[in-house]
């Protein structure tokens, strides 16, 4: 399942995140092959955060590795359970001294923004083939944001695009990524 999770997530990064410019900084990292894909076998929250912390240490060791996507192919299918993982991961990032060095973005197949309806196409800006924690180097993100005109417009642009294309479009696109195999 590890190779399938990586293949499907790579497909999602290329055909959703980069193609539709949800993250205007992702194309460079894809082209430079600086994204590390790690599949965690964890099904418990304790094991999952330990894997996340290990990946932070790996980012410290691997300067050429710009960012890491941690996919969970064996757990956290329930979105509320995943949000508990995100909360603990963020708390441990601080407790272990990684605050200011790394930040976490999160994606899930059933992602729903707070105060949003589950059927809102805007949720697809954060929907992925697998529950995923994205470790981002804060220094790199700060530099990228400084060189981007009106970075505060990125979320609004993404929401507008998602709603304009509609939920059926995004469902089909995500399902297409899930059909990719190793």
Image (cartoon, grey):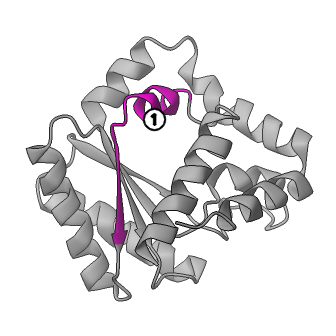
Q: Is residue 27 magenta?
A: yes
Q: Residue drawn 34% across and 81% down?
A: 41
- Residue 117's spot in the image, x, y percent? 81, 64
Q: Nearer the viewer, residue 27 or 86?
A: 27
- Residue 45's spot in the image, x, y percent? 33, 83
Q: Quadrant of residue 28?
A: top left
Q: Residue drawn 33% across and 83% down?
A: 42
Q: Is residue 15 magenta?
A: no
Q: Residue drawn 58% across and 25% down?
A: 152
Q: Residue furthest bottom?
A: 44
Q: Which residues are magenta?
A: 24-39
- Residue 125's spot in the image, x, y percent? 67, 48
Q: Nearer the viewer, residue 10 or 105?
A: 10
Note whether 22 is above or below 24 in the view shown.
below
- Residue 144's spot in the image, x, y percent? 40, 21
Q: Quadrant of residue 52?
A: bottom left
Under circle 1, the secondary element is helix
Q: Residues within 10 Å of mark 1 (few under 14, many from 20)?
A: some
Note whether 161 is above or below 46 in the view shown.
above
In the image, taking residue 86 as reference, residue 26 lies left or right, namely right
In the image, taking residue 43 as reference, residue 128 lies left or right, namely right
Note whether 74 is above or below 88 in the view shown.
below
In the image, taking residue 58 as reference, residue 30 lies left or right, namely right
How many marks do you count on the picture?
1
Q: Nearer the viewer, residue 46 or 15?
A: 15
Q: Residue drawn 65% across and 31% down?
A: 21
Note whether 179 is above or below 103 in the view shown.
below
Q: Quadrant of residue 101?
A: top left
- Which residue carries the number 1 mark? 30
């Amino acid at each position: 399942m590890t190779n399938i999770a990586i293949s499907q997530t790579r497909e999602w990064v290329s055909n959703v995140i980069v193609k539709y410019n949800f993250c205007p900084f992702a194309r460079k990292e894809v082209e430079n092959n600086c994204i590390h894909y790690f599949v965690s076998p964890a099904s418990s929250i304790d094991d999952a955060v330990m894997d996340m912390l290990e990946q932070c240490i790996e980012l410290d060791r691997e300067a050429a590795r710009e960012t890491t996507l941690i996919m969970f192919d064996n757990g956290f299918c329930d979105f509320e359970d995943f949000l508990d993982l995100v909360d603990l991961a963020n708390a441990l990032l601080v407790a272990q001294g990684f605050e200011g060095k790394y930040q976490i973005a999160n994606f899930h197949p059933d992602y729903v923004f707070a105060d949003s309806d589950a059927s809102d196409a805007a949720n697809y800006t954060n929907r992925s083939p697998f529950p995923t924690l994205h470790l981002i180097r804060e220094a790199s993100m700060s530099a990228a944001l400084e060189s981007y005109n009106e970075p505060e417009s990125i979320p609004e642009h993404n929401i507008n695009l998602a709603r304009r294309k509609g939920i059926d479009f995004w469902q089909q696109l995500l399902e297409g990524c899930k059909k990719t195999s190793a």
